[in-house]
Image (spheres, grey):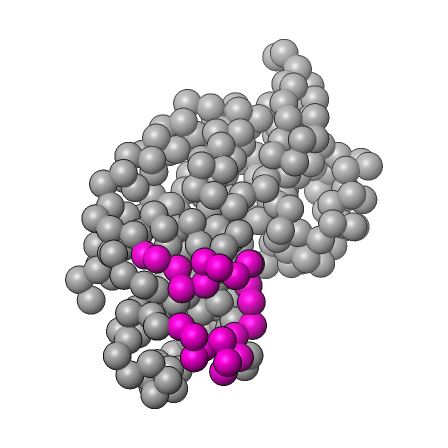
Amino acid sequence: MLPITTTDQMGNKLRLPGYPQRIISLVPSQTELLHDLGLDKEVVGITKFCVHPPEWRKTKAIIGGTKNADLSRMESLTPDLIIGNKEENDRATIEALQQKYPVWMSDVITVGEALTMIRGIGQITGREAAAHQIADRINQSMAGIVPAGKEALYLIWHKPWMGAAHGTFIHHMMEKAGYRNCLRHLHRYPELDESILKTLNPEVILLSSEPYPFKDKHKEELQSLFPEATILLVDGELFSWYGSRMLHFAPYTDTLRQT
């Protein structure tokens, strides 16, 4: 088998002697992608937040969280490839791992970058054809989305209220669904105090299931602030996971639009 030479999304050059046989994934959405690429035998370690596929939580080693991975546990697994992400993983941990192992890093803010990530992981794991098929299916399904055409506020946290603004993957997924993000003039995940909330006029408020698990009681609280808005509890994975879960986004937007 010929050596594999590639560059990840952070510009790091990697050279592997062949396709990896012992992979550790530090990112839940990319763990699911590895499963959908047919890498069940090759993946040996995942984080405690890697909930898809559920059976892997019983058959793979759990190496800690995305921000506090157990380095000694990872070393015991003798990985020949580690897959991480710039935003989700701790920089110091990644730099320590890069001293010992090939580490392929993703950096995803836009849908286009997500598709590039899928193809890149397919290339380095020997699943290039399957990865291209998944990326193409995602691209085609999103092209068929009927735009929601509404001003929307996407909230990720309570006490304080926090939302998803420009410069986030959620923002780009909102745009793909045809929403106009109320926070498009702000950056990343701003705290929203009463003075900011009063400047907003959302037609739809999307309450994410993660990282904060919004419930019906939060809908009631917000309805008093925005009596004219439609308030929906939404699946946060479908707005924030940049892997094969994106295949389910287009049909989900149809459901939201009809709500």
Q: Is residue 12 visible?
A: yes
Displayed quadrant of residue 216: bottom left
Look at the picture and state if 188 lies above or below 160.
Answer: above
The magenta stretch is 179-200
Residue sitting at 39 percent across and 60 percent down?
181
Instruction: State whether the magenta stretch is mostly helix, strand or loop.
Output: loop
Q: Picture coordinates of residue 30 (x, y %)?
A: 52, 44
In the picture, the quarter occupied by the N terminus is top right
Displayed quadrant of residue 197: bottom left
Residue sitting at 33 percent across and 70 percent down?
202
Residue sitting at 35 percent across and 72 percent down?
201
Answer left or right for 119 relative to 43.
left
Residue furthest out toward the front: 199
Frontmost residue, 16 versus 238 = 238
Q: Picture coordinates of residue 33 (x, y %)?
A: 46, 41
Q: Picture coordinates of residue 165 (x, y %)?
A: 49, 60
Asked if residue 139 is among those painted magenta in the image, a careful observer would answer: no
Answer left or right for 41 relative to 18.
left
Asked if residue 197 is among those painted magenta in the image, a careful observer would answer: yes
Residue furthest out toward the top: 2
Q: Picture coordinates of residue 78 (x, y %)?
A: 73, 38
